[in-house]
Amino acid sequence: MELQVNELFANRYRLLKEVGSGSFGEVWLVRDEQLDMELALKVYISLDERGIDEFKAEYKTTFGLNHPNLLKSNHFDICERRPYLAMPYCPLPSADLVGRMDEQMAWKFIRDVSSGLSYLHERDVLHRDIKPDNILQNAEGDFVITDFGISMKMRSTLRRNSTRRQVAESSGGTFAYMGPEMFTGHPEAVKATDIWALGVTLYELLVGELPFMGQGGGMLLRGAEMPDLPDGFSKDLNALVRACLEKDTWDRPTAMQLHEYADARIKGRTVPCPWVKGNVSGKGVSASGTRKNGGGLDNAAAQQTVPNGNLNGKPTATRIDEPVKRHGFVRFWIWLMIVTNSLALIQSIVEFLGRPDGDGLFWMPSNMGIYHAVKIAALFGVLQLTGCLMLWKRLRLGYWVILFSLIVGTLMVSIIGAFSWYSWINPVVSSLVLLAILQIKKNGISAWKAMEPGMDWKRLRVMYSLAGVVFVMLAVLPTGLTRASLSDYPEYSRLISECKNLVEEGSASEPVKLVEARILMEDIREYEDKYGEFNDDFDRSLSLNAILQAKSKKAAEEWTAAAKAQERIGNETNAANYARLAKALSGDKSALTYYRYR
């Protein structure tokens, strides 16, 4: 339905004058016939049943929001499928101040609008459409925000139901207030997006025209330079506007920071502007007062100008030494990964340098079943630690390095050792848990989104070089275990072959061969005690020893009987020799030593 002047809308509101319109509805100055007072009435476009239900749900989320710098509706209802909001009438929209706002009014504007935004952000509500048309000035002269709390889903619903020309959402207006993050392959509005729009609004009100020729933050992605305010405005105000228009979301100030600084200016407190580069020491300083590669605020007074608080409503000390604020649990988890992977790598290298005979200074026991796993663990330990350090340095590539090392390392161990399906639980679960943790948001942006996608060679060239050297060293050199086991394996094979021949030839009538086999078996077991846990090739005596035991037992019984027979006839020399032979066949250590060195 088309609304007309002097029409009685919803049997209550007399339409006096249309004061604004857009693709989603109209705003009228009305007289409430029941209360006999003038109000502003925002009447949205006609919606279908699903759209009406969504609008009701949206209104519920904003119903409890109450702040002096938010224009709160007094009444909500639906008339002929058109939702409408009744609210106090503010006669002066900020759009009337474009090009006419002086610096004194600008600080009041910043204080009022940032206060309202801070209130919304503390409750995880994004405005998504900050612009002069949505900021009004009430009868007391305070600036108030309107049209807040409309989600992207609701905007999509309104757009779907609209038959009007959708100019505000496609060009000029709203398009010019969209931050760089909204022009990427995966646009996502965050709290800092409202700060960008506030910066554009400030620039437009002060200068009289839109920055970046009205093309929005996409111009920054194409290399456009940050605009400056013209002469006549202070460097502090210029630095604040530039900070709001930073390309990276984490370099922009928070709404709370803007409010506290503007409030201090209005109250006459002399505080250095935290976004003026002259107030910050060190290199790589952004306009937002953070540092990227060292440096920091000059003094304690300057630090106090960086207000404590974040966008989650939980006051915390602002970290000056990090350009990207990550959630505390994300930082803890990455540090935990660095520590645990460092310890695992140290153990692998210790085993790499160790001697498996137990006499080496650096030897540490291992539970791995195959000696090659020592080298694999060391190689992929270097990769995993490198990936963890890359994550700490905010490089997204680190996650893929960790994922590669987990999957390929598990695959190689499975191929060399015994394959088992449950060996894949660790890499799958670990990678998913890490990815989930990196999605935890801080100041409206996840740790994953805040990371750079590629490899920063210049910043991390020392780490990459050291990792490469260690990796090549581990790959080229054989492990201490490999050197020892391979050099001793020919001798072990020779002993097994000789022992097998002696066992086959030995019997009660050839007892000396069985004794010699017993002596060789002791040497064989020494090799197996050294390497059998790590190398399956050193495990060939089991069946051979069983045959040797059976033959030796039978021969020992016969020679024990022979010794007793010699004793009965008084031949003590033969009796002693036969008894020693029987003991050697039974495995007596002293008897075997006698025959070993005879």
Image (cartoon, rainbow, N blue to C red):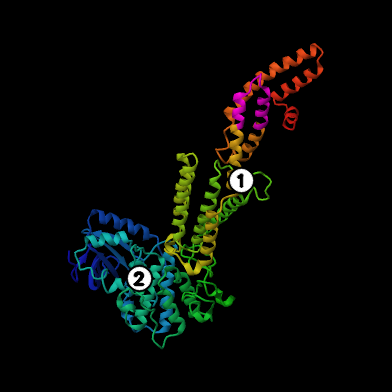
Span of residues in magenta? 498-520
Q: Which residue is mark 2?
A: 130
Question: Is residue 492 something one can see in this rendering?
Answer: yes
Q: Residue at x 59, y 77 (%)?
A: 299
Q: Position of residue 96 (x, y in %)?
A: 31, 80
- Mark closest to the chain's N terminus, 2 or 1: 2
Front position in the image: 158 or 84: 158
Which quadrant holds the N terminus? bottom left
Left/right placement of residue 574 relative to residue 218 reads right
Quick check: 416 left or right of 519?
left
Q: Residue at x 67, y 22 (%)?
A: 511
Secondary element at image label 2: loop
Above-or-below relation of 409 to 454: above
Residue 502 highlighted magenta (yes or no):
yes
Q: Secondary structure at mark 1?
A: helix
Q: Real-space Cα distance between discs 2 and 1? A: 72 Å
x%, y% of residue 340? 57, 53
- Using the image as rendered, state which of residue 366 and residue 340 is in the foreground: 366
Percent x, y of residue 410: 47, 46
Q: Is residue 416 above or below residue 554?
A: below
Q: Which mark is residue 38?
A: none
Q: Which residue is mark 1?
A: 484
Label 2 is placed on what type of residue?
A: Ile
Give the overall secondary structure of the magenta segment. Answer: helix
Three-letter code for the amino acid on which mark 1 is drawn: Ala
Depth-wise, is mark 2 or mark 1 nearer the camera? 1
